[in-house]
Amino acid sequence: MIVGTPRPRLEGRLKVTGAAPYAADVPVPGLAHGWMVTATVSRGRIRELDAAAALALPGVLAVLDHTNSRRLNPDAANYFGPDGSLPLLQDDVVPHAGRPVALVVAETPEQARAGAAALRIGYETEPHDLGFALDHPAARPASTLFGPEADTGDLAAELAASAVVVDEVYRTPEETHSAIEPHAATAWWADGHLHAVDTDQGPYGISRVMATLFEIDRDRVHIRAEHVGGGFGGKTICGAQLILAAMAAEHVGRPVRVALTRRQVFLATGSRPPTEQRVRIGADASGRLRAIHHHAAFALSPLAEYIEWCTEQARTLYAAPAIRTQLTAVPLDMLPPCTMRGPGATPGSFAFESAVDEVAERLGIDPLDLRLRNQPSVSPVSGRPFSTRRLVTCLTEGARRFGWGQRDPRPGVRREGDLLVGTGVACAAFIAGTFPSSASITAEADGTFTVRSGATDIGTGARTALTAVAADALGVTTEAIRLRIGDSDLGMAADAGGSRGTTSHVFAITETAKALREKLPGADLPVTATVDTTPLINWQPDQERNTYSAIFAEVTADPATGEVRVRRLLGMFAVGRVINPLLARGQLTGAMIGGLSMALHEEGVHDPVSGRLVTADLAGYHIAAHADVPAIEADFVADYEPQDTSGVNGLGEIGSCGTAAAIANAVWHATGTRQRTLPISLSRVLSP
Amino acid sequence: MTDETRTEISLLVNGETSVLIVDNRRTLLDALREQLGLTGTKKGCDQGQCGACTILVDGRRVVSCLTLAVTADGVGVTTVEGLAEDGELSPLQEAFVRLDGLQCGFCTPGQLCSAAGMLAEHAAGWPSAVTRGGTPDLDEAEIRERMSGNLCRCSAYPSIVRAIQETAVSR
Ligand code: FES
Ligand code: FES
């Protein structure tokens, strides 16, 4: 049994020696370089675009813009539906600042960059609106692609009958994925086929979008993403780097690489939208919840549908006779947002678990106790049983390890020198499941097995996990497995997103292994089995399937400077059977640090007049650095997911979900002041 | 061919001398990546804010994206490709793999070169912003402070620190 044992990642050696090729590393003969140019106004039209000076510069091969670019099919779509932002350089409309308006192609990156600087672009500016608010006049109900809103019980009556009612508004800002690898793609055409090495989280899905955009058969599109330098959701969408590289390669008849600058990643690739969330919770004097109302709004672009599903916690974490959720979308003149680590659940759990803590505060009940008292036996909204729900164990075991029992409940009273000290807890659920994928396995004559899957490894350890799963499923050691992933030619596969990459690919590989083992006896080698799991997936399971976490935080707050530092962070997780505890722990602590970074540091700020993003670099947009990260521990409670043949659930996102609320709750305990707006920056602590 | 826009330089990279003609605008990072094919060194921001491009120049850690190639004429450079000797991983590299001090791996070359340079700085008795008098022990706080120029968005920070600390202790 290899699954369940801690093993270092298979490509570790390649990565520590610099030998793992990422999208901008692959050598291609005859390569030309494209430099993207983005709009500097927040809404309007391109009045003029003069490329003469750029074209006169040494090495510049072409300037692509809306007047000379090939037409792209406007029907391209992303996961949520039609996406009008995908066809680039098609018209003079500027829907948001940072919209790509041209690409300069040259022999070297320096020449392309100089060409981009020499472009003369004039704009007709139109008024823009980036004034996000829950009650914005353009607010409308969000898409219900993820199912109808919850509305059980008599909310008004339960609120009226409650001994205490918390009714507060919480805000989270625009946040960016900030993967350290900027988006890059290298593309070339040969015999009517498009080839590309791209930075993305799912080359198969991307190949479908590219086929639609360029109106060619999908099997003429070959996208590779062998090593990806982090994604966090920001590389799920078919990126400008790839679309422009493919357009330019066709235009100049040579391979073209488009590597976005860090600034362009901020300006031209989607981020997590800002949210504003009103949470109302009513409880009786004994701490039983009677009413839960979570109304969340998020911003999006009119160009593409999107869902920041903030209301997930309200419908699953606690029992209450009345539960209502509402999700509102506010269209603004912004870049279309994009799912980011723990989409919806991460900002949503900040609001919801902060409000739950406020209920405990007003009732004078220990916040851990309040959470334990309101655990549902079945899903409070759907009435379905849970397939597995080890949340109580996460809470109680976490409390034991953290030393919660000794906690002084009073806020704002513990001092260590000049610092105030506090602790907080929060929990979270994240929906789990499986998406259709395929795999194929060949039993080779030499006794090895070649496993092909369209999966990608964006740092999740997928390569290592899938190899372990394949070895167990075939009853061999990992040395006998040759896994090939990261290529759209390897078959249909879910992308590495929604915490479903691993479960989806594991399911495809185990089913394929089963099929192969049936074929093997007496067969002439090599023999191959291929399985597509589409017909095997149960879309209407009679049980609700989630992963769970309990996060405990200890913080210090400096009343003189307003600086909050996290001193201790513990996460207990119920994520089904763990394939590789070493790698899973890294994933979870990494996600918890993402939550810490969200709680204390990250904030995309737009200039109120120009609408442009002020924080478009890693100095203006601070993400947690080594010195921000304290002693941190993630561990698992024993768990098994019965809906999955291998017992596993995804764990890429649950770690980021409860962390910000646990930290905010600890800040309250330290200072006596609630922080309802993220990030908990120095100024917010000093003047709440 | 050199002219007012191009210059010939010579670099000693990972023990091998290379003579190359560089665009005067070219960074040392791009010279390594585009001209010498040493793509192990990564470009995370190209503006000195992430540390992914960290290399060792004459033993000292340097962000190669903020170093113009023409200014590096004649220097000795060590990149991530030069950390292993005769195919054998250095103790630092081995600890990164074993303790999982990486996820996507994109910041890893910079973390490794930075850690190697940092350990040398520490051995030479350099203090950091958190050092309080005397020769500092390389505890977690010292390592975190000294490594804070190297961002890791996967946030493998705890295991990176562990790997560095273990290497430092076993030296
Ligand atoms: S690429 Fe040099 S510091 Fe980021
Ligand atoms: S390992 Fe991905 S950025 Fe550090």
Image: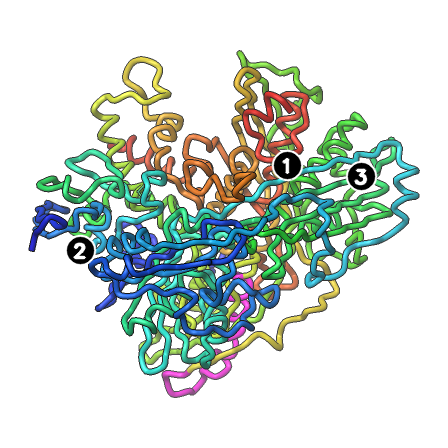
SS state under label 2: helix
Q: Which amino acid does label 2 sit on?
A: Gln
Between A660 and A560, the one lying in front of the other is A560
Could you tell me if residue A143 is visible in this image? Answer: yes
Q: Residue at x 15, y 36 (%)?
A: B58
Compared to B148, does A90 lie above or below? below
Secondary structure predominantly adopted by residues drawn in magenta: helix
Is A197 drawn above or below residue A131 in the view shown?
below
Residue A190 placement, left or right of A456: left
Marks 1/2: CA–CA distance: 48 Å
| Residue A373 at x, y percent in the picture | 79, 38
Q: Are marks 1 and 2 in contact (CB under 8 Å)?
A: no
Q: How dense is the environment of label 3, judged by Cα within 10 Å: few (below 14), some, or many (20 and up)?
A: many
Q: Distance between the residues labelled 2 and 3?
A: 62 Å
Helix, strand, or loop for circle 3? strand
Q: Which of marks 1 and 2 is in front?
A: 2
Q: Mark 3 points at which residue?
A: A281
- Tell me which residue sits at (24%, 32%) in the image: B171
Residue with the mark numbered 2: B35
Disc 1 is placed on an element classified as helix
Q: Is residue A547 visible?
A: no
Q: Which residue is drawn at 35% across and 35% down?
A: B149
Instruction: Indicate whether residue A608 is drawn in magenta.
Output: no
Q: Mark 1 points at which residue?
A: A661
Left or right of B41? Residue A99 is right
Amino acid type for the residue under numbered disc 1: Ala
Figure disc tally? 3
Return the chain for callout 3: A
Disc 1 and disc 3: Cα gap in Å?
16 Å
Does mark 3 fall on the same chain as mark 1? Answer: yes
Q: Which subunit holds the residue at mark 2?
A: B
Magenta-colored span: A501-527
